[in-house]
Amino acid sequence: MNQLSQWRPDMNDPLPLYQQIEAYIIAKIKSGEWTQGMKLPSQRVLAKQFGVNRSTIVAAMDRLVSAGMLEGNSGGGTRVAGDGEVDDLTLHDSEGIQPSSSPRKHWNDYVEEGMHYPNLPLVQTINRMEFAPHMIRLGTGELSPSLLPEQSMRHLFSEIASSLDTVPLSYEEPLGSLQLRRELCLELGRRGINASPSNVLVVSGALQAFQLISAGLLERQSTILLEKPSYLYSIHAFQSAGVRLAGVPMDAEGLQASALARLKQLRQAVLLYTNPTYHNPTGIVMSEARRTRLMQVCDQIGLPILEDGAYEELWLDHRPPAALKARDTSGQVLYVGTLSKIVSPGLRIGWIVGSERVIERLADIKMQTDYGSSSVSQLMAYHWLHSGYHQRHMEQLREQLRIRRDTMLELLQQDWHDIATWQKPTGGFYIWVTLTGGCSLNKLFDRALSAGILLNVGTLYDRGASRQLRLSYAYAPIEEMKFAMGKLAELIRMQG
């Protein structure tokens, strides 16, 4: 119900506030935007979003319930009431169809019946509040608008427009733009990953890559192993396809390869998903020795690897060990990369690298899904990589992220030294903080939200991470970061 945050009663209008709210809700119901059975937020939430006292909401709600527009009970909250109409269609008996006396079906009746799982309620709240004005986003997994290469993109747009004979408005071939795939192969080669254009599928970001893999390569009810905690627990790309997730414990060197054989047999797992470089959410970098051991174990037990390389280029102190895919000589590793974390989320360009047979299968599924990623975005991505913009941007971005990381570490040392522990990340976006005292993450989330601070709590990534926070230094401006870190320390101590 995002509409609520965009409207408030007019305090200067002579019409009483409760009547303005009443008229607003009636208009939403009559227009069909709010349909039968839809649940309204609580009176407390409505009062906050409309900027009025709770008694004003109660007055408006009571009048609407009396008028039959809303209905409510103590356990189920307030909902839009049914319209009482029935399907009164009368047909001749000769048509063989009997008139129905059941209520008409609304689209609202289907929202719980789809195959794709809804986001976790907390994720839905985060997704909604990320666009609330004046909200400090302290856990967001994307670059600040100030770090996006806006000026370079303007120049690139201008250069491309002046050199084009025709605007690319047609579909690309199933694997994606050939010139982009060739350029990606050069970029991957600089990281030690050998690939031909036929081994690369262009996708609309890493999330689509996971959806294609779950739909095209995995059977329903199969199980995949992955680090615990993991970003994948906070989304439903695999679960909505009927795939189960089973966690593998981690230590300072990454996921514990020694646990894989036992877990594979115990859970009948079909593959391993891993984010070995600047892991989301912990920031851990899998060590060189652990990567070597992981490849050996997975080869011995016959466990394919899905490698997420989304943060690989975001090294701040020194280059990380080479990707698992760079060590792959037998097609054991399927590698996913993206420009979303390092250039622009809005470009929606990512890629999958694998054997030709696997890539062709995934390309077929993608053609059935969206008939190819944006041709314009693919053209932009090609020129971005080909014209040298990317390397210049990465040098500037690393410099800015170092400043932000060091600032957050200083703030932690200054304000959090007695309430939490953490490790210095050497790249990526995140600091995984463990609170040392008793603290309800749900209460902390709500209190932070009331203070204008949006958090990503640890339980999003592992139900057992009840004392952890994923803090990001990539999004909030430094001045907002300073305020938010100090305020959060106060809120944590209030619960201690």
Image (spheres, grey):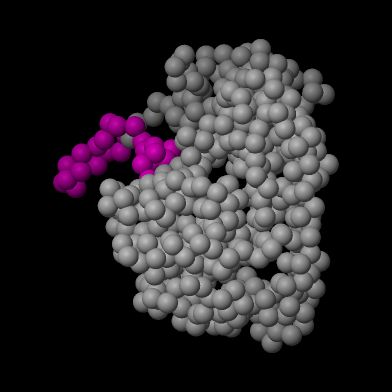
Question: Is residue 480 shown left or right of residue 189?
Answer: right
Question: Is residue 82 shown left or right of residue 125?
Answer: left
Would you identify the image quadrant in which residue 385 lies? bottom right
Q: Residue at 39% across / 65% down in the picture? A: 296
Looking at the image, which residue sits at the far bottom?
Answer: 165
Q: Residue at 47% across / 65% down in the picture? A: 292
| Quarter of the image where the C terminus is located | top right
Q: Main secondary structure of the magenta part?
A: loop
Q: Which residues are magenta?
A: 88-116
Residue 183: give x, y in percent of width and height.
60, 80
Is 196 within the magenta? no
- Count of marks placed on residues: 0
Residue 129: give x, y in percent of width and height.
65, 38
| Quarter of the image where the N terminus is located | top right
Is 106 within the magenta? yes
Residue 301: give x, y in percent of width and height.
31, 62
Q: Is residue 71 above or below residue 251?
A: above
Q: Residue at 69% across / 63% down in the picture? A: 318
Question: Of residues 200 and 31, which is closer to you in this image?
Answer: 200
Q: Could one spot residue 89 in this view of the protein? A: yes
Would you identify the image quadrant in which residue 368 lies? bottom left
Q: Could one spot residue 49 in this view of the protein? A: no
Q: Is residue 230 above or below residue 10?
A: below
Q: Is residue 437 above or below residue 355?
A: above
